[in-house]
Amino acid sequence: MTSSTRNTSDAATFDQVVLPHLDAAYRLARWLVGNQDDAQDAVQEASLRALRYFQTFSGGNGRAWFLRIVRHTCYGWRNHLTAVPTELFDEEQHSGLSTAKDPEALLLQADDVELIDEALRNLPRRFRELLVLREIEGLSYQELADVLDIPLGTVMSGLSRARRAMRGALVDQLELRDRHLAPAIA
């Protein structure tokens, strides 16, 4: 086998193992590093690491393997960031062009999303990771154990505590919102 044939087959295998999970990697990175640009950079760096060390991939769950690399890359990335994360201008959100038919429903939905985002941001990093990977990315308990490199029982107990903490954080956010709205109503 020539080296060019080997590289082509390795690239195809890499494409099959890693590329289907880029969206999940980006969503995880977005939660871990805090903004879109840094998340894109972290996923690109993680992809390069995965390619560089692809020969160490021994088969099995490619999604868990790649998300573990993304997670470790994001932790290293966060340690090197010095700028305070800022929210980027979202042209679609602020353009005034909307295909929705019910503005009130959209406003309520946006308010709920912001409430959930804020509650999630206020959770400890470990809880936030577990919830994002399980509830948003849909990883199984075994995949979570593989990605986080922890025992299955720790995943289950951690998710239970994370869900409890999320409920508490949501209650806190609702109470905070109600306190801010009360003077405006009176």
Image (cartoon, rainbow, N blue to C red):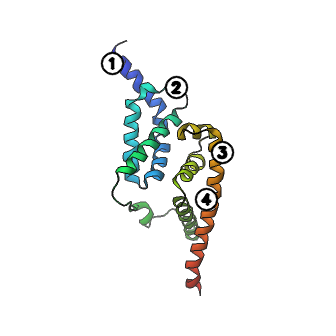
Distance of mark 3 from mark 2, alpha carbons?
Answer: 25 Å
Give, as a three-letter code, the residue at label 3: Met
Q: Is residue 6 above or below residue 84?
A: above
Q: Is residue 146 above or below residue 181?
A: above
* Camera-nearest residue between 126 and 90: 126
Q: Residue at x 44, y 67 (%)?
A: 96
Q: What is the spatial separation of the Cα atoms under label 3 and label 4, in whole angstroms?
A: 15 Å
Q: For the residues marked 1 and 4, what is the alpha-carbon distance in whole angstroms?
A: 51 Å
* Amino acid type, callout 4: Met
| Residue 156: numbered disc | 3
Select label 3 or label 2 by which is in front.
Answer: 3
Answer few, some or many: residues within 10 Å of disc 1's Cα (few below 14, many 20 plus, some between 14 and 19): few
Q: Residue type at mark 2? A: Gly
Do callouts 3 and 4 mark residues in contact (Cβ within 8 Å)? no
Whether tag 3 and tag 1 are in contact, CB under 8 A, the answer is no
Residue holding disc 2: 59
Q: Secondary structure at mark 2?
A: loop
* Residue contact at pointers 2 and 1, CB within 8 angstroms: no
Q: Is residue 179 depicted above or below 69 in this figure?
A: below
In the rendered image, the quadrant that contains the C terminus is bottom right
Mark 3 falls on what kind of element?
A: helix
Q: Which residue is mark 1?
A: 4
